[in-house]
Image (cartoon, helix red, strand yellow):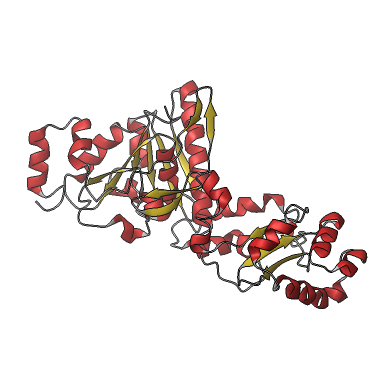
Amino acid sequence: MRALSGIRVLDLTRFPPGGYCTVLLADLGADVVRIDAPGTNPMSFGGSTGIGRGKRSVAVDFRHADYEDVLRRLVAQADVVVDNARPGSLDERGYGPKQATAEHPSLIWCSITGFGQDGPYASWPGHDLTYLAHSGLLSALSDLPWNPQTVVAVPIGALMAVAAITTALFDRERTRHGAHIDVSLAESATWLLSGIEGHLSDSGWTIPSSPARQLYRCGDGRWVTIAADEPRTWTALCTGLGLADLAASGRPESEDYEAVRLRIADAFTTRPAKEWIAELGPAGVTISFVHEGSTLVDDPQVRARSAVVDVGGRPVPANPIRINGVDGPRATTVTTPPPATGADTDEVLAEAGYTAEDIAAMHASGLLGET
């Protein structure tokens, strides 16, 4: 049995922050039910196989007069609700966290937004780059200007949401009370600066760039990373590359930076990455492939731990959480492909107490989409 088996999560989100959050909850055993607009493709809202898997979908027209009644019934069946709407907007429409938690004191409602539920920026729109920039993390990761090629703040915020939800579920066991959880994507990204002493006062220490800490292209065109800052690892690197004279002089001084880097770079071009890793790794050099695309899928460490799984014919990252109970390892990754919009509508509504006649009438009225 998975850790969150028996927990029902109602997913009202339409964008990746919610998807990242609820897929982890599904992996851990929760029954995640999405509410989708009829005729839409969840993938069109920034979803993917990786974050859409393992869930059920109910199609309900948000514009229909009876939408709120269905929402109330589904919320009543849920332990957790997750939304990413503009702060206050669901309450303004007539049914949001304020009304729901008043009706159901044990309900846990998690709102994931860019800047949180209050403050002067609460209603501001944004994208991952917006929150990453505001957080201070963008400038901490690299010299400006640079543009991340993937989302960073969004999955960090989703992880914070999962931590908060599981904590609230634990607390509910003791108090019998739920909570309204407020997760800010920008603040979640700022939290990653906790280990960078003084960064928020402009006097923080940053990891220096040097020939000993660098990316190098190998003879087969693949890149590797080297982090050989300590005397021992620097010596092992230089010796392994056939540059013993550099090892004898200790770590390079700043004035030698470019000349030393070029010598090391030239040495790496003489052999393919796999050979360098096989030789330098056992010698004590901290070295790794820079994976791109499918090269990660074929990595022996990834294969050994099933860190990438097949979902509907697509390779996707597995849940990195591993749980070993007294009965052995527990499954923590759901590989059921994302549902088609509305694929589980009738089933979920029946679980919420609607009769077959009720559901047929809803279909006829257009509440559940076109008939």
Left or right side of 265 for 365: left
The spot of residue 276 in percent (x, y) is 70, 62
In the image, residue 37 above or below residue 170: below
Residue 156 in sight: yes
Residue 77, x across and y down, in percent: 29, 31
- 96 sits left or right of 248 in the view: left
Most distant residue in the right direction = 249
Which quadrant would the N terminus be assigned to in this image? top left
Of residues 108 and 320, the one nearer the viewer is 320
* Residue shown at 28% from the left, 48% from the top: 339
Choose between 258 and 140: the one closer to the eye. Answer: 258
Query: Which quadrant of the figure has residue 324?
Result: top right
**Left or right of 80, for residue 221:** right
| Residue 31 vs residue 66, the one in the foreground | 31
Q: In this view of the protein, can residue 87 be seen by the observer?
A: no
Q: Position of residue 111 (x, y in %)?
A: 43, 46
Number of numbered discs on residues: 0
Q: Position of residue 326 (x, y in %)?
A: 53, 22
